[in-house]
Image: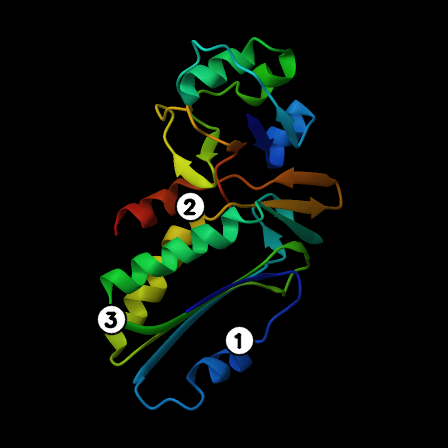
């Protein structure tokens, strides 16, 4: 599963994208974030403030309880500041 | 209907002329142009760099336009959003709404901007003499979105 990071989320993790293989027990975005936080301090840093980082599955905004089964690409990013 | 992302500057007047040229069904054109201020969110800035999520940005702006057209009788819409490096005084974003009567154009343009501010995947980084920082999203933008 491909993960992409943007803005300061990308800066804290140190990568713009990566392929990951979470365990089968990870079902939702919330679960994915919790698992990512165990994978290194850079993820701890990026996801430190609960509820701040936003997420899109296959380029559509979703909530933290969204299921990840079938997702081709998951993107994590800060609250948006366009316009 | 159109959504355009680009790094180059744009000319609001020329875009309005292009959208309205040749048609006689529109009684109202409302446009909003967002500009880069020197007095940024983090202090006096020398430049702003706009990062975006290619693909999702266009799709999300397209979704905003579709929602506005569902809610109001808009004849046409144009959204232009720049990305990359901008300096104070530069245009950042353009939203134009066309309708037969003014209420739809005013409200459609306002709605699209309020939604764009909170859901279009762009992120601003301000450059000042003493360093750079990411602009933080504002609660007032969420409030503006929620009133629709």
| Residue B66 pos. (x, y %) | 34, 59
Residue for badge 3:
B73
Q: In terms of secondary structure, where does tag 1 sit? A: helix
The mark lying in front, picked from 2 and 3, is 3
| Residue B3 pos. (x, y %) | 48, 63
| Residue B50 pos. (x, y %) | 62, 50
Residue for badge 2:
B118
Residue A18 vertical placement versus B58 (above, below): above
Q: Residue at x 59, y 20 (%)?
A: A20
**10 Å crowding of disc 2: few (<14), some (14-19), many (20+):** many
Q: Are the residues flagged by discs 1 and 2 in contact, CB closer than 8 Å? A: no
Choose the circle earlier in sequence order: 1 or 2: 1
**Do we see residue A82 in this rendering?**
no
Residue A72 vertical placement versus B48 (above, below): above
State which quadrant residue B9 falls in. bottom right
Closer to us: B22 or B27: B22
Measured Cα–Cα span from mark 3 to mark 1? 22 Å
- Check if mark 3 and mark 1 are on a common chain: yes
Q: Are the residues flagged by discs 2 and 3 in contact, CB closer than 8 Å? A: no
Q: Residue at x 44, y 42 (%)?
A: B138
């Amino acid at each position: 599963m491909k993960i992409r990071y943007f803005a300061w989320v990308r800066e804290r993790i140190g990568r713009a994208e990566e392929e990951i293989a979470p365990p089968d027990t990870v079902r939702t975005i919330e679960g994915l974030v919790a698992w990512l936080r165990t994978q290194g301090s850079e993820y701890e840093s990026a996801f430190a403030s609960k509820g701040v980082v936003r997420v899109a599955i296959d380029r559509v905004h979703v909530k933290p309880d969204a299921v990840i089964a079938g997702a081709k690409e998951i993107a994590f990013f800060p609250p948006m500041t366009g316009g | 209907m159109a959504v355009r992302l680009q790094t180059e500057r744009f000319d609001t007047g020329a875009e309005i002329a292009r959208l309205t040229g040749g048609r006689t069904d529109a009684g109202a054109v409302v446009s909003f142009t967002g500009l880069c201020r020197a007095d940024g969110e983090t202090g006096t800035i020398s430049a702003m760099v706009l990062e975006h999520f290619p693909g999702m940005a266009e799709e999300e702006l397209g979704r905003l336009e579709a929602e506005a057209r569902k809610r109001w009788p808009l004849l046409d819409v144009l959204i232009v959003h720049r990305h990359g490096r901008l300096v104070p005084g530069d245009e950042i974003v353009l939203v134009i709404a066309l309708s037969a009567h003014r209420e739809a154009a005013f409200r459609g343009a306002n709605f699209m901007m309020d939604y764009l501010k909170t859901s279009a995947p762009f992120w601003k980084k301000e450059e000042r003499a003493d360093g750079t920082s990411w602009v933080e999203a504002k609660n007032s933008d969420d409030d503006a979105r929620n009133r629709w």
